[in-house]
Amino acid sequence: MLLTEVRETAHGSRPVCVEAADCAGRFHGIERQMNEGLGDGALSAHVQVHLLARDCQWLLAHHTARVGW
């Protein structure tokens, strides 16, 4: 997965401390959710996918705002 590459890029950019903590928290949350799997049922899977999508969208929006695409 691209998570490792994205993390390395983010750490290499040396953002402001608050930004770094926010990004690190999102990365950690994504990894934790990936390790937990989708759960035991359709509702659990739906919630997990929604949470992963939300964190990934936040990271993409944050990166886009910083880079200025």
Image (cartoon, grey):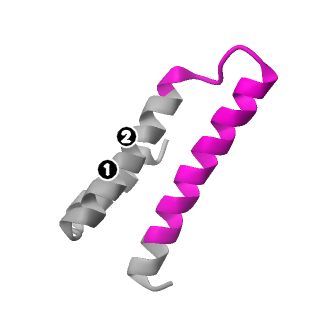
> In which quadrant of the rendered view does residue 67 lie?
bottom left
Q: Residue at x 65, y 24 (%)?
A: 38
Tell me the residue that label 2 is attached to.
28
Look at the numbered discs 1 and 2 and tell me whether their residues touch, using CB distance below 8 Å: yes
Residue 15 left/right relative to 67: left
| Dominant secondary structure, magenta | helix
Name which residue type carries label 2.
Answer: His
Residue 32 left/right relative to 52: left
Q: Which mark is residue 24?
A: 1
Q: Nearer the viewer, residue 68 or 47?
A: 47
Q: Residue at x 75, y 34 (%)?
A: 46
> In which quadrant of the rendered view does residue 57 lie?
bottom right
Q: Residue at x 29, y 65 (%)?
A: 19
Name which residue type carries label 1.
Answer: Ala
The residues colored magenta run 35-62
Q: Is residue 1 above or below residue 43?
A: below
